[in-house]
Amino acid sequence: MISYDIQEFGAPLVRAERPTPAPQDSEVLVRVLAAGVCHSDLHIWHGSYDLGNNRKLDMTAASRLPITLGHEIAGEVVALGPQATHARIGQKYVVFPWLGCGKCKVCERGDENLCTSGGRSLGVSRPGGYADHVLVPHERYLIELGDLTPEHAAPYACSGLTTYSALKKFLPRVFKSETLVLFGAGGLGLMAIIIAKALGGAGVIVLEPDASKREAALKAGALAAFDPRDEDCAQAVRNAAGGAVWMVLDCVGSSQTVEQGIKLLTKGGHLVQIGLFGGHIDLPTPTHALRAITYQGTFVGNLRELQELIQLVRDTHMPPVPTTCMHLSNAFSALLALEQGTAIGRQILTPNA
């Protein structure tokens, strides 16, 4: 099999060729047909997260090189371990990548993405989808595509799942009656706009400094899009939201976006942060309580939520996020485009592009 791996943090990905693994026990071998390029891949490639104040969370000690990135995977089952009895050879699936230890109480209640005993996520701790094959440890992590194409389905494993799980954290009665303010119109942000509409949300207002991405947000269904650098941006957003901002979804997660989002919130408002751009904020404790605001982080989602999301996509005929398909061999170029902010929507690696 062929993969494109991190062999040195921050260095170009390296093409590797090794024997295609044979599935054992409950494992399933999937031929990768589409793999999304996610912003989290950049952090893994860098080997760190920015904590602000000139501090970094160093991930290199915990990461064993080489690493094959890629956690947004859709493909075709080509081989089964002897204990895999439900998956079908030749059937196409999207792969749930956020695997836990499978044994702790967190995993047992269905929240493997929050496993505290050491995760085994594909493309993070286990080889991922920047390859022509991926070994999935159990068939329960496979969700049938139905009539979805692999290119359409792959981003739901992370950007779709993450935004779906985040949107569910807002109170339903607020979500359906108040406008959502969204920071960032990259792959996550565009996905959030589309899913919010499918869930029956009241509408989305986008804050995005890049004009081309603001245009993409409007095409995806946003009610309005503003440049957060404009002097009168805060008032313009409040006016567009009907006078008060009750919900903020931050798909960037920088010091600036979190601080701006918290300032925008009305009393009783709720900010959910997805983005991992990095930084540091100071929160005054008295006003946090007096304003009764909620500042909540969210990390991807669980298997049940991905199953719900794929069903939602099928039931509502939800359109795909804007995508650019390219050959697997362009994996490093796709990473660089993401780092430079030039990618619109999701970049998808395929063996046939």
Image (cartoon, rainbow, N blue to C red):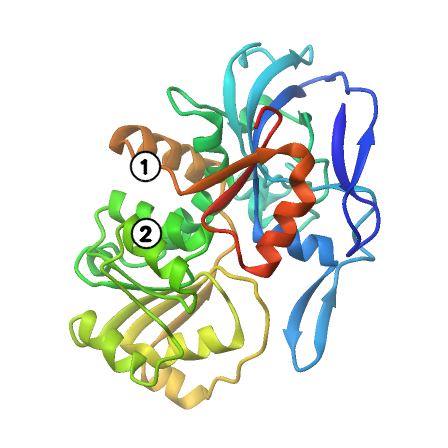
Relative to 303, say whether 2 is above or below: above
Give the amino acid at mark 1: Pro
Neighbourhood count class around disc 2 (C-alpha, 10 Å): few under 14, some 14–19, many 20 upward = many
Q: Mark 2 points at which residue?
A: 193
Looking at the rendered structure, the secondary structure element under dot 2 is: helix
Q: In this view, does 269 lie to the left or right of 90?
A: left
Looking at the image, which is closer to me, 123 or 305?
123
Q: Residue at x 36, y 81 (%)?
A: 263
Whether residue 198 is visible to the viewer of this picture, yes or no, is yes
Residue at image position (77%, 49%) is 12
Residue 293 in picture, x, y percent from top left: 35, 76
Q: For this rendering, which residue is in front, 338 or 212? A: 212
Answer whether labels 2 and 1 touch (C-beta < 8 Å). no
Q: Can residue 121 be seen in this view?
A: no
Disc on res. 4: none
Mark 2 and mark 1 lie on one chain; the one further toward the N terminus is 2
- 277 to the left or right of 274: right
Picture quarter containing residue 257?
A: bottom left
In the depicted view, which residue is nearer to us: 21 or 220? 220
**Disc number at residue 319?**
1
Q: Is residue 242 left or right of residue 4?
A: left
Q: Tell me the distance, in whole angstroms, between the alpha carbons under discs 2 and 1.
A: 11 Å
Within 10 Å of disc 1 (Cα), the crowding (few <14, some 14-19, many 20+) is some
State the residue at coordinates (46%, 39%).
156
Label 1: state its secondary structure: loop
